[in-house]
Amino acid sequence: RKEVEQDPGPFNVPEGATVAFNCTYSNSASQSFFWYRQDCRKEPKLLMSVYSSGNEDGRFTAQLNRASQYISLLIRDSKLSDSATYLCVVRDSSYKLIFGSGTRLLVRP
Amino acid sequence: EAGVVQSPRYKIIEKKQPVAFWCNPISGHNTLYWYLQNLGQGPELLIRYENEEAVDDSQLPKDRFSAERLKGVDSTLKIQPAELGDSAVYLCASSSPESGGELFFGEGSRLTVL
């Protein structure tokens, strides 16, 4: 079993749609959680950190459920520019960052 | 502020040849990472440095891969000899406590082994 698992997608949604991705992690001692975005043939970039109480940044909302060991990302009012791969990232107790394989999102006009 | 700089961007070599990648992290970032990313996969850690010390190299295939970070700034990653399965993108990243642990990646070095 992978340490961080994501649905690879692709999620194909129309502009303006709301879409949600989930990610599960296996190590209950994991300390920090993040979503990174990676455009095609580009490097990953931090989208947002995920806090225990949940957090929102504009159209993006991240949630953490420690009991069930999953993280979610909700994107409202999808834009064409949101098309990318979204990587779930978990930091373990040794400060090691573990990346999921990513969920691909395609937003169509 | 300059970002993480990697070179070369692209490299094509024949199997059994050596190859080296270079990384210059963001100024002041004491932590440097080398990741390997295959198509359709997330980055996988090869090695992490805190200044000049390799603190996590458990995923580095030491029979053919080596890395160094002399003086705790620039780093090189070497593969000798390269195998077909080494074709991938090699990403360098850096971070600092002041950045909240956020990783800043370079554009990557895309290796093709023929």
Image (tube, rainbow, N blue to C red):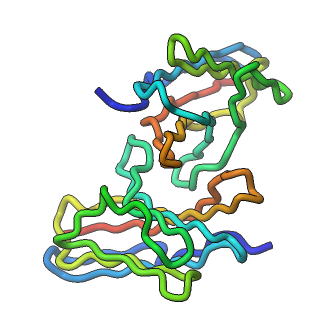
Q: Where, quadrant-wise, is the C terminus of chain B in this rendering?
A: bottom left
Residue sitting at x 76%, y 25% = A60
Task: Between residue B27 and residue A36, name the one nearer to us.
Answer: B27
Task: Between residue B66 and residue B39, name the one nearer to us.
Answer: B66
User: Would you say residue A8 is visible in this rendering?
Assistant: no
Q: Where, quadrant-wise, is the N terminus of chain B in this rendering?
A: bottom right
Percent x, y of residue B96: 68, 62
| In the image, farthest residue toward the bottom | B71
Above or below residue B56? Residue A74 is above
Residue sitting at x 44%, y 49% = B43
Res B77 quadrant in image: bottom left
Above or below residue B7? Residue A15 is above
Task: Between residue B26 and residue B21, name the one nearer to us.
Answer: B26
Question: Is A7 left, or right, of B32 in this rendering?
Answer: left
Percent x, y of residue A8: 43, 27
Percent x, y of residue A52: 70, 22
Above or below residue B78? Residue A105 is above
Question: Is B64 left, or right, of A62 in this rendering?
Answer: left
